[in-house]
Image (spheres, helix red, strand yellow):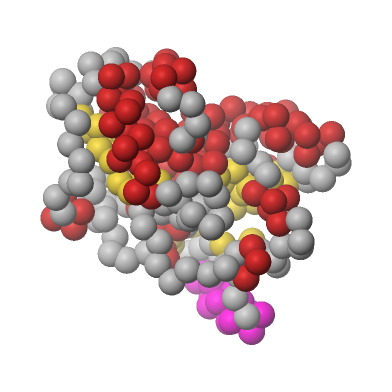
Amino acid sequence: MADGKTCDTVESVIISVTTDAGITGWGEVCPIPHYLPAYARGVAPALSELAPIILGADPIGPEAVMARAQDWLQGHVYTKSALDIALWDITGQAADLPLYHSITCIAPEDMARIAADAQGEGITQFQVKLGADAIWEADVAAKDTASLLKGHALGVMDAVALKLSKFGGLSETRKARDLCLYLGAKMCIEDTWGSDITTAALSHLGAATDPRQVLNVCDLSGYVVPHVAPDGPLRKNGRLAPPDAPGLGISPDPDILGAPDLVLE
């Protein structure tokens, strides 16, 4: 990470949204405080603030709810990312439709070892973060369509990493994806971190994108234990496919998740 900062563990926040019809959508965000202006334990207070917008709202068609959420509470994009993913999960389930490896900054010899192991598993393409210079903010600049247009205008956007929690979930990242397709920029579809829920969302977005412009889709859950969803996407022969079931297509295990920290009714 920037300025030599590291972390041994990260805290991920998993949310579920249940409709009157009994459909449950799942979302996740795993903010890393010294990488982005986000804080995992800030998610619950932000969701509480958004309760008047969320409770009783029609969850089908996430953009409408998310637009009202933005008007109600400015900023807190990372919280809205988890909510947006959960709403898309609900939308896909209601329509009975599925929503259709990154190496960290470590010692070069460890990078080479990990890459060799991954190649043995069938992976043929690698994303390697070489580190950032003194102006490390350039590494985290892509966060909305305006920043993408600026990068394109400067001639420095042959490829871009689209991270769900930086854009605010699937709705806004989808807009960024469409702009990248138009501009001809290749994409790494990923997030700051996450488990099976985030990886499922990424796999659906990746599968719905022109493969000629996708460099990789990050299998974040491959680095995380325990797996919270037994039916989450798994890498096979170097490839990752989205689940075929409606919505995100996963069913997180409540016994693994434990009791919720916050319930809004």
Quadrant in which residue 87 is drawn? top left
Q: Residue 29 versus residue 256: which sits nearer the camera?
A: 29
Identify the residue at horizontal 20%, vertical 41% (top origin): 262
Q: Residue 120 magenta-drawn?
A: yes
Compared across the picture, whether 4 is left or right of 46 comes to right
Q: Residue 140 versus residue 23: which sits nearer the camera?
A: 140
- Using the rendered image of the protein, determine whether residue 199 is visible from the camera's viewpoint: no
Residue 257 screen position, x and y as percent: 20, 54
Magenta stretch? Answer: 108-122
- In this view, the residue farthest toward the bottom is 109
Identify the residue at horizontal 78%, vertical 45% (top origin): 158
Residue 17 screen position, x and y as percent: 25, 32
Q: Main secondary structure of the magenta part?
A: helix
Q: Quadrant of the N terminus?
A: bottom right
Q: Residue 191 magenta-drawn?
A: no
Q: Quadrant of the C terminus?
A: top left
**Is 119 placed above or below 109 here?**
above
Q: Residue 47 versus residue 183: which sits nearer the camera?
A: 47
